[in-house]
Image (tube, rainbow, N blue to C red):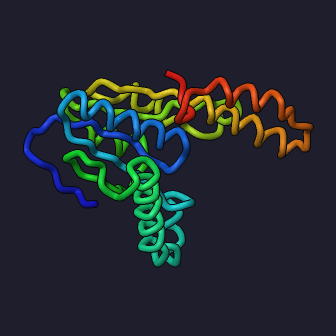
Amino acid sequence: MSDYRPPSAARVVVGVSGSLGSTTALARAAVEARRRGAELWPVLAWEPPEGDLAGRRFPASRAMVPQWEQLARERLVEALREVFGGTGTGLPGQALVVRGAPGRALVRIADREDDVLVIGAGRRGRLHRALWPSVGRYCLAHAVCPVLAVPPSPLESTLASVHRRNTWRLRLDAGRLERESAALPPGGART
């Protein structure tokens, strides 16, 4: 997990955060890399919790940078294990952990016209969009290569609905959940 780059192999660069949406995107990126005969570059971009500006204003937080970077590495390894069953992808390429805003980092790495940038396109409400910038929107607006935005799995939507109902202490309709899960093909993803 370093900044090594081979000369000019075709690449599929994928943003990984550890979320369900990003693991769905990672799996889709692997399919795309195999289809294209390209390298797979999973990238986890991280920033200090309060951003780089806080690090300059509060020098004591700089001591935490190695731990934050280690946590980012562990999150990437966990995502690789979740999707591939181990830390290897079975494809040529390089897994990277980079410090920086995710959108900017992904666009900086997927910097060739023949690259493909894969991102998870999660569902976001108005409040969420207003408070947190969208990595996907940034990549779509600034990438020099094609961007593949992978929608969330239907299972992710069902899990989010259950979580909301639990948060608000609303009654769960177990029959509806059972019907929805029965409608999903093996593996939980609709094709």
**Left or right, residue 60 beside residue 2:** right
Report the residue that reaches farthest toward the left: 7
**Left or right, residue 46 beside residue 175:** left
The residue lying at 26 percent from left, 27 percent from top is 144
The residue lying at 46 percent from left, 28 percent from top is 150
Report which quarter residue 85 is drawn in. bottom left
The residue lying at 39 percent from left, 32 percent from top is 139
Picture coordinates of residue 49, whole percent (x, y): 55, 60
Relative depth, front residue between 55 and 181 = 181
Q: Quadrant of the N terminus?
A: bottom left
Picture coordinates of residue 18, whole percent (x, y): 50, 50
Report which quarter residue 72 is drawn in. bottom left
The residue lying at 52 percent from left, 78 percent from top is 60
**Left or right, residue 20 beside residue 128:** left
Q: Is residue 148 above or below residue 69?
A: above
**Left or right, residue 96 beside residue 80:** left
Q: Is residue 112 visible?
A: yes
Relative depth, front residue between 5 and 177 = 177
Relative depth, front residue between 104 and 170 = 170
Picture coordinates of residue 108, whole percent (x, y): 29, 41
Report which quarter residue 8 is drawn in. top left
Relative depth, front residue between 183 and 18 = 183
Q: Is residue 7 above or below residue 1?
A: above
Q: How many marks?
A: 0
Picture coordinates of residue 64, whole percent (x, y): 49, 74
Q: Is residue 152 visible?
A: no
